[in-house]
Amino acid sequence: MNNLVDLDTPASPALATPPRASRAYVLPLIVFAIFALVPLSALWGSQSFILALVTRIMILALAAMSLDLLIGYGAMISFGHAAYVGLGAYSVAILASHGITDGFIQLAVALGVSLIFALFTGAISLRTKGVYFIMITLAFGQMLFFLGTSLAAYGGDDGLTLASRSMFFGSKFLKNDVAMYYVAFGVLLGAYLLLRAIVASRFGRVLRGIRENPVRMEAIGFAPYRYQLTAYVIAGMIAGVSGFLLANQTEFVSPAYTAWQRSGDLIFVLVLGGLGSLHGAIIGAAVFSLLADILSHYTENWALIFGPILILVVLYARGGITGLFGSKL
Amino acid sequence: MTLTLALVQILNGLQFGLILFLIAAGLTLVFGVMDFINLAHGVQYMVGAYLVAAFTAMTGSFVAGLALALPAALIFGLLLEVLIFRHLYDRDHLDQVLATFGVIIFLNQAVKYIWGAAPLNVSIPDALSGAVEITDGMLYPVWRLVIIAVGLAVGLALYLVVNKTKLGMLVRAGASNAAMVSALGVNIRLLFTIVFGVGAMLAGFAGAMVAPILSVEPGMGDNVLILAFVVIVIGGIGSIRGAFIAALLIGLVDTLGRFFAPTLLKLLLDPSAASQTGRAIAPMLIYILMAAVLFFRPSGLFPSKQ
């Protein structure tokens, strides 16, 4: 856990000071402990519903967390991040429809496709700044959305149902919902630790420096473009993995996964939980999903409540949920 | 025959492009003057279409419906500005994107709640509901020609206001350096409210004009919004001239691309593969165009800021 301790000495006072190191991992520790214990809810019954919901939360959290590397640490407001979820999901579905069900091959393709798409679109998008960057990432996401809708061979608008979940070592253990749950849990935990390490590394410090003042960083000898592009590719690949998991969990893919509204949801999740903390994305994903789930039980017009909540969060709850906790934990 | 078909497609592209221009004009000015990114602009287009549908049903006449819908769209836009957007000008782009995204979520559901999820139909005034023969045996709907004429007229009027009047001068000055204009004693907030109101009304007007030829349904503004963003980014944020040229470009490329891409690819591929790839590539064309423009000119074709 050295990386967490490193966070205690920010490079510049202008950077958001993280909570004291001894306490910085209390909140994430609680979050992951809860996730680890959720399957025990079987003891009280109604397991499959809760398992599916929390698996979805963890997959959403994974995508939002990768976006945090871009928005929270790199100030790159990507409005097309759902594209990578779609790429990962379609990698699984298209390979499976051709009879390739080996999870490692599917995962490798998901990562590879995300890498190529992120490298290509990132290289163009990062030439622009500010609003133009938001717009161009949005446009690339839409491009993929329309590509998905026109793939008649793979379901087009209607999407594609998976014949089966991915196989690992020739075994179909992912069919078991508890196994699926713990795979998602393991991936989320792994990605969290990886991103923690990245953020605390020299690379992460440079990235945060660029967020605060790109001109100064350039003046002292760093090329912002390369660091930002690397972060963009890493984030895209992690989101691709979340797409891989999403396809397996729902056993269905559709162009709707890449719609720009989904990219908006990812940003909402992130801001709701709190930017630039990584575990904020996880908490945001949990609150977002539970809220949507609970509200939709009461009324089909839950969006009438959801929209204003979003506006109020932006106007009055700066720093998100972790921001509220930040001073105490 | 092919030539006539091409002519029809060009007219369709022109009509689509002019509708995009009506939406993009307000968006680009709001963006340019206040540096405010308003995702809810597409909702204004939807609201315009719903208002004209409601008022037409109420009065029984499209013209009366339109006459009532326009001020209503204006008031609605100003209401949103006062209630929500005004609190966002000093925030960063991320906050603006999110809050206006919340407005979209709310209003899409609200129109579904009020008018139902089923598409509404709006009838055109009888005098304009026919078709004219543009070449031998090729009929073209009069209403689409009306949209083209009205779009061009609005474009010309905006050009004159922005380039020849004092108000237009202030808008242009605001788009290139808002702080300086404010320091020179101009009430930039009032200026912005005017620009915002006109922009919202134009988007509502665009929605009203297409209401008779498209289905009026919840979420109809969402995709148009993205296209309007593509337009203003290609044209250069804050530039009416850029928005006009880019809107026509996007309208024509999109319409002609969908029509000709499968045909052109037949020269290279076998027919079924050509129509497959053609249909896959066509909707992506405008985004590829946008990426290409931004690659060579990262601030669009006619940037208003230096």
Image (cartoon, rainbow, N blue to C red):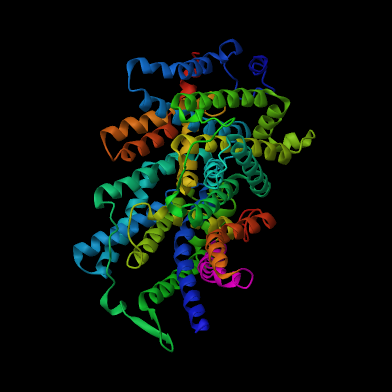
Rendered residue at 38%/17% (across/down): A41
Report whether B154 appears left or right of A108: left
Task: Give the residue furthest to the front.
Answer: A170
The picture places residue B110, in percent across and down from the top left corner, at 30, 46
Q: Main secondary structure of the magenta part?
A: helix
Residue drawn at x 67%, y 57% is B297
Q: Does the magenta-highlighted stretch encompass residue B4? A: no
Residue B102 vertical placement versus A13 (above, below): below
Q: Position of residue A293 (x, y in %)?
A: 35, 32
In the rendering, at what x and y percent does residue B201 appear? 38, 58
Q: Note whether residue A319 is visible.
A: no
- Which stretch appears magenta? B240-269
Judge left or right: residue A19 versus residue A119.
left
In the depicted structure, whether residue A70 falls above or below residue A205: below
Q: Is residue A63 visible?
A: yes
Frontmost residue, B160 versus B256 = B256
Quadrant in the rendering for residue A4:
top right
The answer to which of B159 and A53 lies nearer the viewer is A53
To which quarter of the image does residue B176 belong? Answer: bottom right
Please check the rendered image and state whether residue B249 is part of the magenta-colored stretch, yes or no: yes
Q: Which of the two residues, B122 or B258, is positioned nearer the viewer here? A: B258
